[in-house]
Image (cartoon, grey):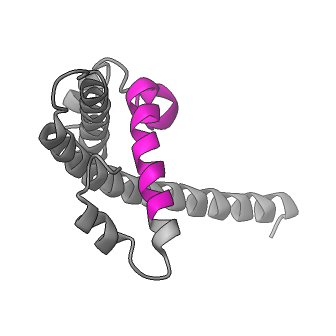
Amino acid sequence: LQMIYTPAQLAHSTAGNGAAGRMSRLGRILLSAFVVALHPEHVMEHNIGNGACVSQLNSSAGDEFIVCELETVALARAMVSALMSAASSVGEPPRIDALRVAWRAWSRTFTTWKQADARRLEDAMVADAVAAVALKYAVLGR
């Protein structure tokens, strides 16, 4: 993260009681880029893979969540690419600006996707709980 933020930005973003927690959260967001980029089939609700989701998108054009997932995977891959490019620039100045741009886009999109995914998960859990209670009453004959 020191490559992405200037020392002043790091000092400002980690000031206060939650400094260690903030750095830990930023680290988890960074590591999530690798998981999402390399294994989207295990992370995303839809089959993103190598663009397999496009047919789903055409059949349900109103599904903004699929678009969010596609964008999240694309930006995760861009983040990993920017990291690898910066790491492989031995003997030349690292491409810090590209890395910062990729980080800002990735962290913003990841947060949006994570919030939307959590809402969908909560909605599914509530629907399952309602169905379980309805099944209970059906079995008991009430």
Write the residue at 32% across / 19% down.
52
Instruction: State the residue in front, 100 or 91.
Output: 91
Q: Is residue 31 left or right of residue 130?
A: left
- Name the outermost residue toward the right: 140
Q: Position of residue 119 (x, y in %)?
A: 44, 61
- Name the outermost residue toward the bottom: 16
Main SS, magenta region, reads: helix
Write the residue at 44% across / 36% down.
44
Q: Position of residue 14 (x, y in %)?
A: 39, 71
Write down the region rendered in magenta: 23-47
Instruction: State the residue in front, 48 or 16.
Output: 16
Against 130, residue 53 (above or below) is above
Marks counted in the figure total 0
Q: Is residue 62 left or right of residue 130?
A: left
Against 96, residue 115 (above or below) is below
Q: Quadrant of the C terminus?
A: bottom right
Against 24, residue 109 (above or below) is above
Against 80, residue 24 (above or below) is below
- Quarter holding residue 75: top left
Instruction: State the residue in front, 62 or 87.
Output: 87
Residue 97 inside the magenta-drawn segment: no
Instruction: State the residue in front, 2 or 43.
Output: 2
Write the residue at 80% across / 61% down.
136
- Quarter holding residue 26: bottom left
Q: Is residue 68 left or right of residue 45?
A: left
Residue 39 inside the magenta-drawn segment: yes
- Name the outermost residue toward the front: 91
Q: Position of residue 113 (x, y in %)?
A: 34, 51
Q: Position of residue 58 (x, y in %)?
A: 19, 28
